[in-house]
Amino acid sequence: MSLIVQKFGGSSVANAERVFNVADIITKAYSQDNDIVVVVSAQGDTTDDLIAKAKEINGDASKREMDMLLTAGEQISASLLAMAIEKMGYPVVSLLGWQAGFHTSSAYGSARIKRVVPDRIKKELDKKNIVIVTGFQGLNRYNDMTTLGRGGSDTSAVAIAAVMNADLCQIFTDVEGVFTADPRKVKNARKLDVISYDEMLELASLGAQVLNNRSVEMAKKYGIELEVLSSMTRKPGTIVKEAKKMEKMLISGIARDDDVARVSIIGVPDKPGLAFRIFSKLSAKNINVDLILQSVGRNGTKDISFTISQANLKDTIEILNPYVELIGATNVVYDDKVAKVSIVGAGMETHPGIAAQMFEALYEADINIQMIATSEIKISVLIKRDDADKAVSAIHNKFFSETEPINP
Ligand code: ADP
Ligand code: ASP
Ligand code: MG
């Protein structure tokens, strides 16, 4: 007998037919003499719809009340899924995050899982129940419901798999696995059979929505192998695991992130300490800065540009506008119509020339690069958002020609 954790995303349970499809997957695994813990997301676009409803009432609602609202989405899908399984004649129980033992930090809207105490889950499994747990939520030290941030159900599933030492953790979604690029946007994107935690973590952090980045971080920390697969086609998916067990791919994928804005401070006096002062101001307000570019000083001044997420743009400009005069800079400008396109691959560490190939693809597509950032296994460029579709396709064509096998 094995313990299997299965997570189903929103589109997998979007309507009654799909709920029964998922119930069929679950009960088949249960009938093969396995203990099954299921983590479920809210149906379809429920979370977005709830956010829209809140905005109709109060555009400035407290994060606590937002979490009170959003946790309801998963309660609906978990109970409906349990009802479907009941109807099929199997023993089942649905549990909210707190009943399943999820303790989180108190940061409403982006809480971190502190620990999972799975006593109730174990009791229910001992009673031979299939256990359905609401993803994306937990309880903080004030006994208030919290949510884990968008896409957080993946993390709920990995947390249960880690604490219960599950034999298998399957993330069912609406595509057949992890692809070389978003398969909904790039038609010749190819499914990967396997990808390392580090590459998956980069892809997820750089905009590939298929797995939440915290879930990958946690899977790596606890050595939980993940299988990402489709709930619709039931074909083998993509395995996410430790790199040493696999061959290194040159490039494993391309990711795109539209949630970026570029801010530039023009005419900053060219003397020590100013970058420090500017970025400390932002970090004091918890504003995360991503790409940074500083021009070489000329005539005693320089320009400093950086990117942030769109949600932080208003605050950043409000913080910097009065400050700019104080430090003797000229002004602050911003552009919120940019996108970050990145390539990720463990092989680039040992293969020079990957950056040149990426830039060549962009040049051939007549796309201008505004900023560049690199690390050992990724290269990111900032470009005009209108160019992003074209950029992803051009880069994809450059690295994944039809004939070249991937995952040899
Ligand atoms: P779920 O609701 O199951 O959690 P998500 O919408 O969060 O599903 O994630 C799946 C989506 O991720 C896919 O529909 C796909 O459009 C998108 N995606 C982006 N990049 C990739 C990629 N590299 N591989 C697979 N899917 C990707
Ligand atoms: N329902 C939540 C969201 O839409 C959590 C998830 O789907 O993982 O972000
Ligand atoms: Mg998701």
Image: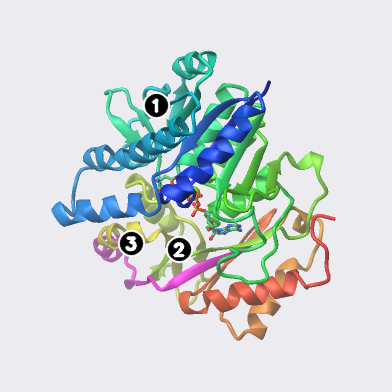
Residue displayed at 38% across by 22% down: 99
Residue 243 within the segment the image draws in magenta: no
Residue type at mark 3: give it: Leu
Residue sitting nearer the eye, 24 or 156: 24
Residue type at mark 1: give it: Leu
Is the residue 255 above or below the residue 241 in the image? below
Which residue carries the number 3 mark? 313
Q: Which quarter of the figure is the C terminus placed in?
A: bottom right
Which residue carries the number 1 mark? 95
Which color scheme did the rendering employ for the protein?
rainbow
Residue 334 within the segment the image draws in magenta: yes
Residue 355 as seen in the image, left or right of residue 128: right
Which comes sooner in the sequence, label 3 or label 1? 1
- As helix, strand or loop, the secondary structure at mark 2 comes to strand
Measured Cα–Cα span from mark 2 to mark 1? 44 Å
Is the residue 33 above or below the residue 376 in the image? above
Find the magenta span and give its range.
320-344
Residue 277 at least partly seen = yes
Measured Cα–Cα span from mark 3 to mark 2? 11 Å
Residue displayed at 75% across by 42% down: 243
Residue displayed at 50% across by 27% down: 90
Which residue carries the number 2 mark? 306
